[in-house]
Image (spheres, rainbow, N blue to C red):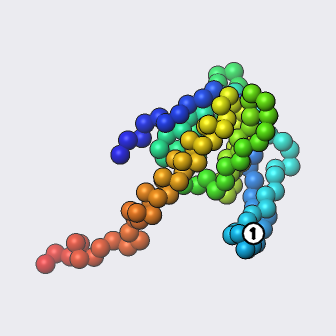
Amino acid sequence: MSYGVIASKAAQVQVDQVRPTDAHDTPSGRQRRWARAEEPALWGSGRLTLTSLHLTFVPASGSSGVHALTIALADIVAIENSGGRGRRTVVFRTDDVVLHARLTGASSFARQVATSVESNRKRSAAHPLPLEPDDSRLSSG
């Protein structure tokens, strides 16, 4: 399996540490309500890189307030594309982090991430990890 880079873009990123306030079931499925941090996080410039397993942000050397961040694609629960002209904002949500990214070609990048998340989930469903070791291989007969 290759873990090579699928896409890499220069981006401005804002990271919010959040927590779900509650969850409720609806006819269309499970939905979450999100509580943002008390103070808004700072925006920082850097590089947003997508591999087959992770979405990684590495800040530029002069960027303050935003640290390097790696999100496993399996942890992404929602991808939102917000409007704008030229540079749009894409929002990637996990259970405890919301990553806002302003970048050129945001719609295309969001589609690439969504495709990678979906193929990662399909791959995980096709090859689940065993929950307990197989004892028959461990016994000396």
Expressed as whole percent of the image width and height from the top left, the position of residue 123 reads 43, 57
**Depth check: 17 or 9 in front?**
9
Kindly identify the residue that appears in the image at 70 percent across and 37 percent down: 101
Kindly identify the residue that appears in the image at 23 percent across and 77 percent down: 136
**Depth check: 19 or 49 in front?**
49
Quadrant location, the C terminus: bottom left
**Is residue 92 left or right of 117 when viewed as pictured?**
right
Q: Label 1, on which residue?
A: 23
Circle 1: element type: strand
Location of residue 34 (image quadrant)? bottom right
Expressed as whole percent of the image width and height from the top left, the position of residue 119 reads 48, 52
Location of residue 106 (image quadrant)? top right
Kindly identify the residue that appears in the image at 71 percent across and 69 percent down: 28
> Extreme top residue here?
62
Kindly identify the residue that appears in the image at 69 percent across and 30 percent down: 103
Using the rendered image of the protein, determine whether residue 28 is visible from the camera's viewpoint: yes
**Is residue 137 left or right of 61 when viewed as pictured?**
left
> Extreme left residue here?
141
Amino acid carrying label 1: it is: Ala
**Height in image: 76 above or below 103?**
below
Instruction: Give neighbour class at mark 1: few <14, some 14-19, many 20+ (Cα, 10 Å).
Output: few
Using the rendered image of the protein, determine whether residue 11 is visible from the camera's viewpoint: no
The number of discs equals: 1
> Extreme right residue here?
38
Expressed as whole percent of the image width and height from the top left, the position of residue 113 reads 57, 44
Expressed as whole percent of the image width and height from the top left, the position of residue 83 reads 79, 39
**Is residue 45 left or right of 117 when viewed as pictured?**
right
